[in-house]
Image: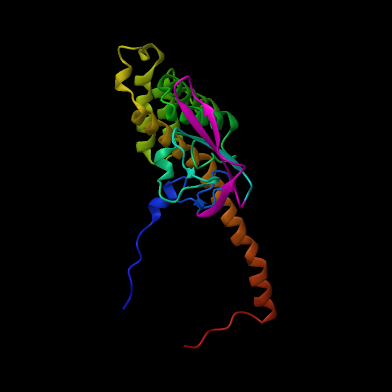
Amino acid sequence: MTTSIEDQSHLDLKYFIDNKIYNCPFCNRRNVQYRFNGSAKLFDWNKSKRCFAYFILCSSCNGISMHLSYQFLCEQHNWGEFRSDVDLDSNIFYSVPTSFFVIDSRVPAVLRELITEAEGCVKMNFLTGASACTRKAIYELTILQKTVGSNYEDRIKDMKSRFPNIDPDLFDILCHIKDMTSDKIHEQSWDQWDAKHLMLFIETLKQILKDIYIDPDEKKKRSSYIQSLLPEVLKKKISNGGLTSTST
C-alpha cells in the first residue's frame, strides 16, 4: 500500500517556513537553516509605536537579511530565536530584501534597482513611489531593447513582436501601464490603483525579464554541458571499436 505525499510546494512561496528553516533570499536555496545575527533589536517607530528588528543570517551563504515587525516574535527569555507557535511571514510587515528572490544579476542593474525599490514601496504602501519605479523600469527596459514607438504601449507592442516565444499575454498586461501615467497620480484618481494592481505589473515585468535575460542563458549553459559530455562518449566509442548492440 502506497502512502500519498502531501503537496507542500506552497512553502516555496514563504520567506520563513518555521523558526529554524527559511528560503534564502541571497543564494536562493530552499529549506535552508538560518540563525540570528545577534539578537532582536527594539526601537521606536514613532512616539507611540515600537518596532522590533530581526537580523537573520543564512547558514549556507552567510547573507544577512533584515525583518521588521510590531510584534515581539522571539522566545520570551531568548531574543536570539523565533517562537515556534507563530506564522512569521504574517507578522512581519517589511523585509530587506523585500522578496525572497533577489533579482538575478543577469538582469541589468538599472532594472534590478528599480524593481527592488518598487517592491519595497508596495510593502510600505507607498503606492505613488511604487508606480513611478514600475513605470520607470518598463521605460528603461524598452530603451535597453531599443524598441520603437512614441509611447509606452507602442514600445511594449514592438518588444512583444521581437520575443514571439514569450507569452504575449504578459506584454498585453504591461500595455495597461499607460493608464497609470503621471497626470493620473493624484488624490481623485488614485483609488483605482492599489497594491494588487502594482504587484500584477511588477510580477509580470519580472517574468518577462526572466524570459529575456535568464532562461536563454540557462538554456545555453545546459546545451554547453551536454556538448561537454560528447568527447568522453566519443572517446569510449573509439576505444571500444564502435557502439555495440545490446541484447535483450
Q: Is residue 189 above or below residue 2?
A: above
x 57%, y 56%: residue? 222
Query: Which quadrant of the figure has residue 233?
Result: bottom right
For this orientation, the residue located farthest to the front is 77
x 43%, y 22%: residue? 126
Count of numbered circles in the view: 0
Answer with left or right where residue 144 lies relative to residue 132.
right
Query: Which quadrant of the figure has residue 151?
Result: top left
Q: Is residue 165 visible?
A: no
x 61%, y 52%: residue? 60
Answer with left or right where residue 150 lies relative to residue 214.
left
Magenta stretch: give its range.
31-60
The picture places residue 79, in percent across and down from the top left corner, at 55, 43
Answer with left or right where residue 236 lies relative to residue 16.
right
Prevailing secondary structure of the magenta residues:
strand
In reply to whether residue 227 is colored magenta, the answer given is no
